[in-house]
Each structure stands twice: as C-alpha cells, then as structure tokens.
Amino acid sequence: MKLLIKGGTLVLKDGERKADILIENGKIVKIGENLKADCKTIDAAGKHVLPGLIDMHVHLREPGFEGKEDIESGSKAAVAGGFTQVCCMPNTNPVCDNAVVVSYIKNRQKEVNLCKINPIGAITRGQEGAAMADIGKMKVAGAVALSDDGKSVANSNIMRLAMEYASGFGLKCLCHCEDKELVDGGVVNEGFNSTLTGLKGSLRAAEDIFIARDIALAESLNVPVHICHVSTYSGVEIIRSAKKRGVKVTAETCPHYFVLTDDIITTYDTNTKVNPPVREDRDRKEIIRGLKDGTLDCIVTDHAPHSLKDKQVEYNLAAFGMSGLETSFPLSYTYLVKTGVLSLSALAERMSYNPANILNLDGGELKEGAPADITVVDLNEKYVIDGKNFLSKGKNTPFNGFEVYGRIKYTLVDGEIKYGN
Ligand code: DOR
Ligand code: ZN
Ligand code: ZN
C-alpha cells in the first residue's frame, strides 16, 4: 500500500521544487528530500510531478453512443492524457437528467476503475429546454454540476429558475453559450475564411449574447455561473469586466481555441469542425491573455469523440467536436509554457487546482494529506501527434502532424498506477 516517487521536480502552488513523495493507502503522506521507504519506487529523475490533471468538460458518450466512446475507452484516454479526474456532460442517450443515469455512470466508473468520473446532470429534462430536470435527486446521486451542454437553455426564465434552484443545492450551471437562431446553421466562424471556403459562418455575437445573458442572470440573482469553452475575444472581455464588478463568474477555454485559428478550415478537414468554432487570430490572442490574467480559470478539452462515419462526410453534415483528452497537456505545455505565457504552476492551476475548486472536487494540489492523484511528465520529450495512436475511440483530431513537448509518463489515481509502468 506504499509507493515512493523519487527525484522529480514537483509543481507546487508557489513554484517548482525537487522533492520526493511518499504515498500510503492512497494518500500523499510525506513530501520531502531523500525520503526512504521499502516499497515500489517510481524514478522521476528528470521528470516533473504535477497534481493529477482534472478535466471538467468531457463527453464520454455512454450510455447510448458507445460507437463514439464509452466509459472504459474514455477513461483509458483520460489517464493516457494525464487526467486523474474528469466531469462528463449529460448529452447521452438517455440524457443524464435523473438520478438513475447519474448512478449508472458512477457504477461504471467503479467497474472500469481508472480515472475518477464525476457526472454532470442536465439542467432541463431531456435537455429540451422546457422544464427543469430532477436537480435535487441528481445532486444526492452524485452529480457535481449542471449543464445542457451541446446547446443553451434558450428560455431566460427557465435559466433563471434553474440557476436559483441549482445554487440552493450548491451546484453550478455550466453554460454552453449559443444563440441557435443567430447561428442559423453556421458551421464555422463568420469571417474572411467562411467567405473564402463558402462554408456558412456563425457570428461571435451568437456566443457573446448568451455569455452576457448568463452573466446578467448570475449578477442579478447573486449566484455563481460558469461559462463553457470561450472562443471569442469579445467573450473574454465580457467575463473580465464582470469579474471586475465582483460577479461570481468562472470560465474555461480549450486548447483548440488558443492553438488554432480558422485558417485551418481552408483544408475542409471535418476534424476542424467544432462548436463553438475556432475563430481568428484576434480571438486566439485574447484567449491567451485571458488565461494569463486569470479571466479564464481553466483549460478543459471538451473531449468530443466521434466515429469515422460521423466525420467522413461533407463539412456541413459532419458532427461538431474534437477528441481532446490525449493532446490537451502537451498542447497546453507547448503553446503556453514553452512560449513563456504561463509558468508550470500557473498551468497546473488552470488544469487541476481551479477545476477542483470550482466544482468542489477533492484534489488539485500536491500536499500532504491529499489524495495521491498525481501526473508525472517528461517535458523534454518531443513527439508528433497522430490520432491513430489515441486510446480514445474518437480519432478525430485537427492536430495530426503537430510537434509537441510533454509526454505523460505516469498517471496515479488514489496512489495506484493507472497509466505508465
Ligand atoms: O463541438 C462540440 N461537440 N460542441 C458541443 O457543444 C457538443 C460536443 C459534442 O457533444 O459532440
Ligand atoms: Zn458545448
Ligand atoms: Zn461539450
């Protein structure tokens, strides 16, 4: 029941420090120099040791869409990506809008026994936007948040009631921000490249209107709200100014929004199709600024695995989404830390500490007494992304051929090695 991680550089809240970690019965019992114990030892010399990564926005597709992904394949992808904990969105079939589906996911997590999985319940029944789901019962069954991700709750009064009701149960609404009528069938960002390609565009306003609405509701009601996958420069600015006023708003973005621009759609590769769409350099730069100044609290993947047949069709018909679990850390490290935007500690904050804090999850920090959820990485190892190697069933990545740094070596959950050997 003991394990020693020796010789690594620990990524702590206040910086990096060379030290060993002793784990006993699933917990970090000691952090210090030259620790000795008669037990299995992980040699972390030359490696970095991070608090287990936490992805608060993934789609695991089970129940109902197991052709795209299931809880087992999604968990394998998660631990391969360095994630010790994920939160899964409710757009399954049946929708996770009741305690039975929440319990089903938790039971499957126990059977699969890789990463921790926290179900997110739907805000409205069937995610249909008409009536509230069984929020209280889902909370009791173990839901950690609420979301109708995949769409917005269009009716502002229902959203108001849901936000008030959810806050009474200590749950946050995670808002996918999209004005469906304004999107009007758009599949990419509306701008130069949508004109060039002839693909129908979608305005930034279609996202920003709902970011502003959900913040306005949170501010008027004095309840917390979390904005999903921010992709627009203007959305970052709305959130920044709300935070300055003291609104209880938190927000996330994804690697594709700070690595890519919509130049990539000119290939017509359907793996570039995602909702919200990747936008322009102005957006990419502001998202990076938002991550640096803390306007954007977390990096999530919005892991949206799809099967080949969902993607090998013309652009307009292809499914939205990217398989993200196995590229998130190396992309974030390469594009944010190696470029000098974030320190490693700041990256760990956005990929572990902040998600844990926002959703009240255990973990997020390397400290004595904490669960031994730990990710060991080799930051010097360089490799080229190839979706064919993903453990996820979803091979749909726009990052094939991208050269990245940062290879996950070990992922430990409650002191057990779930990835690496
Ligand atoms: O690209 C996306 N894919 N955006 C969403 O909001 C939903 C997700 C999915 O479930 O495939
Ligand atoms: Zn979404
Ligand atoms: Zn999503």
Image (tube, rainbow, N blue to C red):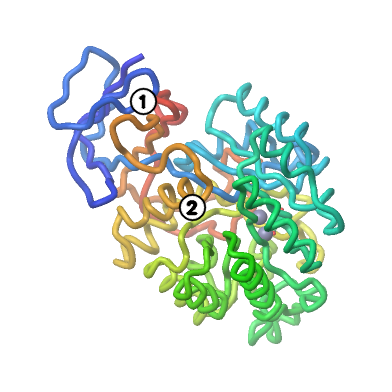
Q: Position of residue 399 (x, y in %)?
A: 53, 59
Question: Where does the N terminus fall, quadrant-wise?
Answer: top left
Q: Residue tagged by mark 2?
A: 328
User: At numbered mark 2, what does the secondary structure look like: helix, strand or loop?
Assistant: helix
Q: Name the residue under label 1.
A: 27
x then y, percent, for residue 162: 73, 56
Q: Amino acid under label 2?
A: Ser
Of tags 2 and 1, the one toward the viewer is 1
Q: Which of 53 and 186 is in front in this view?
A: 53
The answer to whether residue 5 is visible is yes
How many marks are shown on the rendered structure? 2
Picture coordinates of residue 116, whole percent (x, y): 54, 33
Tag 1: residue type? Lys
Judge: label 1 CB < 8 Å from ligand 3: no
Closer to the camera in the image, 406 or 102:
102
Label 2 CB less than 8 angstroms from ligand 3:
no
Query: Is 112 drawn above or below residue 232 in the view shown?
Result: above
Q: Which of 56 and 49 is in front in this view?
A: 56
Q: Residues within 10 Å of mark 2 (few under 14, many from 20)?
A: many
| Alpha carbons under labels 2 and 1: distance apart | 26 Å
Is residue 266 among what the camera can see?
no
Q: Residue 336 carries which label?
A: none
Q: In which quarter of the image is residue 134?
A: top right
Residue under the image location 47 percent in, 37 percent down: 84
Q: In this view, does 206 lie above or below 332?
A: below
User: At x 78% / y 78%, what residue is drawn?
Assistant: 182
Q: Is residue 328 left or right of residue 383?
A: right
The residue sitting at 27% across, 21% down in the picture is 41
Q: Dividing the image into four equal quarters, which quarter contains ligand 1? A: bottom right
Where does the image place residue 339, in percent across and percent down from the top left? Answer: 32, 67
